Amino acid sequence: MFKKNSAVFFAVGFIACMLFVPATQAQKVRKTVFIIVDGIPADVMEKLNPPNLAALGQNGGYSRAYVGGVRGTYSETPTISAVGYNSVLTGTWVNKHNVWDNDIAEPNYNYHTIFRYLKEQYPQKKTAVFSSWLDNRTKLVGDNFEATGNIPVDYHFDSLEHDKVKYPHDKAREFMSRIDEDVAAHASQAILQQAPDLTWVYLEYTDDMGHMYGDSPQFHKGISLADKRVGYIMNAVKEREQKFNEEWLVIVTTDHGRGAKTGKDHGGQSDRERSGWIYTNAKGLNEQFKQPQLSIVDIMPTIARFMDITVPRNNALEVDGIPFTGAISFVQPTVQLAANKLTISWKALAPNGDVKLWVSSSNNFKSGGNDDYAPAGSVALAAQQAEIDFSAKAPGLYKIVLEAPANTANTWVQKKEDGSLVTKF
């Protein structure tokens, strides 16, 4: 998806074209659990090859998945924890969801989370959050916030970092390992007994060990413990599938990598800080589930597709990810910028169909409105290239959508007063 010599990378999303589900699968109740294990770069996961995660990948797949948005463009995203969580939840980068750091000061709830999409379409379905950070449920998911449509989180076990009686804080931060243990145990028990339809589990201890010790035996031990805890959840999922008519999607990922020098820090745009990953049991993995295009924003639309959630068109045009399962029309959309002209290219995956080009000169969606997209041409998908002439357009921000039968891509450009087009503003 991202090419080094490209002037800009297209954020890729989806609109409709929900997958055809075979009758034997459609009879099963679909449920999802996704797990974020904090702050582990891909090279360490590949070196350690933790057994439970390796087994998960053998049932589906493993791939590196970048974090941090598109380096050097408007979507460049800090490789910081809460920022990464919200990219997973919303399928968008920081220029949209507006969570710039761990303070979570002003999330833009107009970019909905997967929890909201599920609850608005299926109010009867149950959701759950198991996490050390209280802010994950309250500020990010927006449990019963008016701004998030008053959607409830039905089951939760969190805010444990505030319980200093049960988890007395120590300088070695072993209390966080005990919290993660209880979080994973409660999550697995809830999956066995209540079987929420959508569950988010967050494990923090690995990031603590990274900050304290960097690349070290302590950090590796933290990863081993996290893998053990993921095993609790995988065992619960297996038991549900064996005893009940259910099919579970499991996705495990990270929010950021670590600095290359010591492994203690993160937040920047180095290759290692951007080196995330995904393990999943998903079936029907497609071309998107590969480097260099796979990223953490692909998780939200993948869950939506699996859970048969229809994202409203205006919202779908803003989604920066693409489902990594099922049918897709193209990958690797890129743009070359020249004076007053965009040359768009992509890798076609389907032999037939057209690509429609749309352009909007407004960004009303950011403040809760809708944008008017004007058609800018249509070409055969197999052509793998199109152009948009900006010579007659006024200076300002433009949003471009590339729409094919099975997926879409979106990008932003700014036309400057001198007629040049830029993507960092």
Image (cartoon, helix red, strand yellow):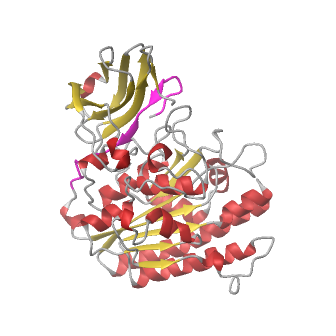
Between residue 341 and residue 416, name the one nearer to us: 416
> Where in the figure is residue 10, as x and y percent of width and height?
41, 34
196 in relation to 92, above or below: below
How many circles with numbers are drawn on the protein? 0
**Is residue 384 shown in magenta?**
no
Label the magenta part by its dominant secondary structure. loop
- Describe residue 11's horizontal placement relative to residue 163 as left or right: left
> Where in the figure is residue 56, as x and y percent of width and height?
49, 62
Is residue 138 visible in the rendered image? The answer is yes
The residue lying at 49 percent from left, 69 percent from top is 138
**Is residue 7 shown in magenta?**
yes
146 in relation to 424, above or below: below
374 in relation to 115, above or below: above
Between residue 138 and residue 248, name the one nearer to us: 138
The N terminus lies in quadrant = top left
- Describe residue 316's horizontal placement relative to residue 38 as left or right: left
- Describe residue 318's horizontal placement relative to residue 372 as left or right: right
Image quarter for residue 208? bottom right
Is residue 332 visible in the rendered image? The answer is no
- Describe residue 387's horizontal placement relative to residue 87 as left or right: left
Between residue 405 and residue 233, name the one nearer to us: 405
3 in relation to 329, above or below: above
> Where in the figure is residue 140, as x and y percent of width and height?
48, 62
The residue lying at 28 percent from left, 54 percent from top is 311
Image quarter for residue 172? bottom right
> Where in the figure is residue 371, as x and y percent of width and height?
27, 40
The residue lying at 32 percent from left, 80 percent from top is 244
State the extent of the magenta-drawn residues as a range. 2-20
